[in-house]
Amino acid sequence: MHPSTLLDDEQATSKRRYEFRVWGDRTDASRQLARLAGDHDRQHLRDCYLLDGNPARNTKIRDSRVKVKYLVDERLGFQRWSSVWHAPTDGGRRPSDRLLGEIRRIAPESDDYQDAVAEAVEVFGADDRPSVVFVTKHRRRFAIGSMKAESTKVTVDGNPRSMHTLAIEGPDLDELVGLRAELGLAHVPNLALHLAVGLVSGVG
């Protein structure tokens, strides 16, 4: 899918932030984040990822909205993503507009929500149709100055094992590099969430 099929720049609000995400048991780093932040909040999220095989594009559905992230830069092990929340154009005829229109009519808490989303992506041609993967996230979020961080348990539908991920993000690369070193993560590889979901689900 070409990027323009999933967003309309005139409708969208975009932000660009550097992100670093690691996987596995990071208990010490999570405790350090809690000490640095002093407080945190919790989220329980149900997301649907639309995996199209492009590692530089991360598309997900949350609460009848679509968020698209594009990889625009990589520096010092950090990835810089441009993120956009998108809504359909009234009367739009593109497959993406039809998809988003269908999503807005589906109640996320309904019993047939997953089947309805899977059917909605049929608006794309066979060559462009993304794979649909649902995940559940239990997340703790932290704020440290201009930086944000999270510690999240991720469960992919159809896989009994949960994954654990820790991420830091923000606009200032120097601050992030310093925080990464303080957390003891300077030599740990960075892997975006949608790529990990693809690997676990077998459609990445």
Image (cartoon, grey):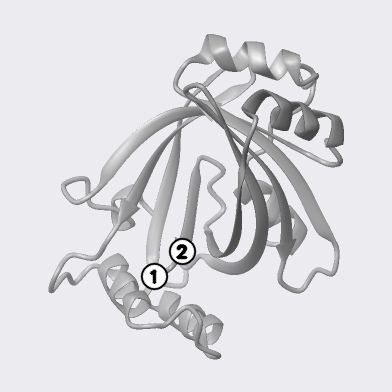
Residue at 47%, 23% in the rendered image: 146
Numbered disc 2: secondary structure: strand
Which image quarter is the C terminus in? bottom right
Residue at 64%, 65% in the rendered image: 135
**Residue 104 visible here:** yes
Residue, disc 1: 64
Q: Position of residue 194 (x, y in %)?
A: 61, 50
Given residues 199 and 152, the one toward you in this image is 152
Crowding around mark 1 (Cα neighbors within 10 Å: few <14, some 14 to 19, many 20+) is some
Residue at 39%, 70% in the rendered image: 64
Marker disc for residue 29: none
Which image quarter is the N terminus in? bottom left
Q: Position of residue 168 (x, y in %)?
A: 61, 30
Q: Amino acid at mark 2?
A: Ile
Crowding around mark 2 (Cα neighbors within 10 Å: few <14, some 14 to 19, many 20+) is many
From the viewer's perspective, tell me whether residue 175 is left or right of residue 23.
left
**Residue 19 visible here:** no
Q: Residue furthest left?
A: 91
From the viewer's perspective, tell me whether residue 2 is left or right of residue 196.
left
Q: Amino acid at mark 1?
A: Ser
Residue at 65%, 35% in the rendered image: 167
Q: In which image quadrant can residue 93 be found? A: bottom left
Alpha-carbon distance for marks 2 and 1? Answer: 6 Å
Numbered disc 1: secondary structure: loop
Residue, disc 2: 61
Relative to 24, say whether 77 is above or below: above
From the viewer's perspective, tell me whether residue 66 is left or right of residue 79.
left
Relative to 42, say whether 180 is above or below: above
Q: Position of residue 103 (x, y in %)?
A: 37, 76
Q: Are marks 2 and 1 in contact (CB under 8 Å)?
A: yes
Q: Position of residue 17 (x, y in %)?
A: 45, 28
